[in-house]
Amino acid sequence: MDFYNVPYDLCLSGHNLNNRTGEGLGGWTIEVRNSSVLVNTTQTDSNGFWQLCNLTSGRYTVCEVKKDGWIQRVPSNPDCYDVTLVDKSKTNLDFCNDPGCNLTLTKTADKATARR
């Protein structure tokens, strides 16, 4: 019979940043899945930093929960990270987002300028 130890103190971490300014985006949800099963979630802190620990070796998918009014730029296509943990934690799993455009256009015409 063979025995071996599986590391159980592995971590995934990164930042969520404003792509235009480089400032951290606090209060964003990061999800970690093992195949299709949700393993855990965490929130970014006021500096945009996030970390999830107590993970075992294996393959994980790390995604941010999108927020209305923001466009995810990093990672792109796919918009999540696929990570394999073996014996070391993974860092620098960063997400970058651009604020969306809140432009409203109004078209008006009067009788003098309107064509029929």
Image (cartoon, grey):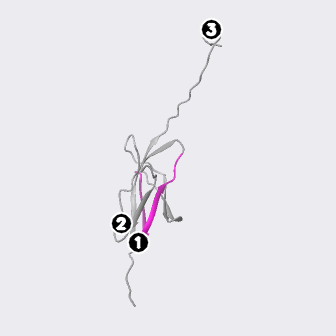
**Element under disc 2:** loop
In contact (CB < 8 Å): disc 2 and disc 3? no
- Magenta span: helix, strand or loop, mainly? strand
| Quadrant in the picture for the C terminus | top right
Asked where in the image residue 50 lies, by quadrant, the reply is bottom left
Quick check: 15 left or right of 28? left
Real-space CA distance between mark 2 and mark 1, rounded to the nearest whole angstrom: 9 Å
Q: Residue 20, how many percent across, how many down? A: 39, 40
* Callout 3: SS: loop
Compare marks 2 and 3 and give the one earlier in the sequence.
2
The residue that appears at 40% across and 72% down in the rendered structure is 57
Q: Residues within 10 Å of mark 1 (few under 14, many from 20)?
A: some
The disc placed on residue 89 is 2
Based on the picture, tell me whether residue 39 belongs to the magenta stretch. no
The kind of residue on which mark 2 rests is Ser
Number of residues whose C-alpha sits closer than 10 Å to that of mark 2, classed few (under 14), some (14–19) or many (20 or more): some
Q: Which residues are magenta?
A: 47-67
Residue bearing mark 1: 57
Q: On the picture, is 1 further left or further right than 71?
A: left
- Three-letter amino acid code at disc 1? Ser
Side of 8 relative to 100 (left or right) = left
The kind of secondary structure element at disc 1 is loop
Residue 61 counted in the magenta span: yes
- Residue where numbered disc 3 is placed: 112
Q: CA distance from mark 1 to mark 3?
A: 72 Å
